Image (cartoon, rainbow, N blue to C red):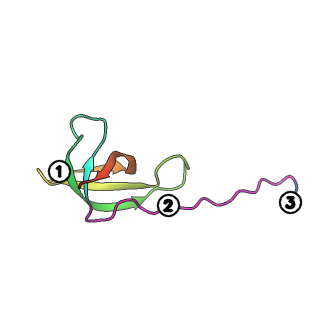
Amino acid sequence: MRGQDVQTPLRHRPSRFKVGDRVRVNDDAPKYRGRIGTVTNAYQLPEADPQRDFYRYVVVFIDDGADAVYYDFELEMDS
């Protein structure tokens, strides 16, 4: 195997949030920061960039029923 670049396959980390979880937006945009909603869909992204989160989440906001899509790092569990 000399001269070959052997890489260990990336392991997918599990989805941090599940459908039905109540979450709070911690995004830097003041318009959305602190809003509370429910995760209605979670989907896995292709492995194009291993540095990025593998999941996106659709959140429906409790106060007005609007929805938006977020990365893992933009959300936290609402306590």
Whether the magenta-drawn stretch holds residue 9 is answered as yes
Q: Secondary structure at mark 2?
A: loop
Residue highlighted by disc 2: 13
Query: Tag on residue 1?
Result: 3
Q: Residue at x 24, y 40 (%)?
A: 33
Q: Disc 2 versus disc 3: distance between alpha carbons?
A: 29 Å
Q: Picture quarter containing residue 57?
A: bottom left
Q: Main secondary structure of the magenta part?
A: loop
Q: Residues within 10 Å of mark 3 (few under 14, many from 20)?
A: few
Q: Disc 1 versus disc 3: distance between alpha carbons?
A: 55 Å
Q: Which residues are magenta?
A: 3-21
Q: Picture quarter containing residue 2?
A: bottom right
Residue 43: x and y, percent?
39, 60
Nearer to us in this view, 37 or 47 = 37
- Look at label 3 and name its amino acid: Met
Q: Residue at x 50, y 60 (%)?
A: 13
Query: Tag on residue 20?
Result: none
Q: Residue at x 20, y 51 (%)?
A: 36
The mark nearer the N terminus, 1 or 2, is 2
Nearer the observer: mark 1 or 2; the answer is 2
Q: Residue furthest left?
A: 64
Q: Secondary structure at mark 1?
A: loop
Q: Residue furthest front?
A: 79
Residue highlighted by disc 1: 66
Whether the magenta-drawn stretch holds residue 35 is answered as no
Q: Residues within 10 Å of mark 2 (few under 14, many from 20)?
A: few
Q: In the picture, which quadrant includes the C terminus?
A: bottom left
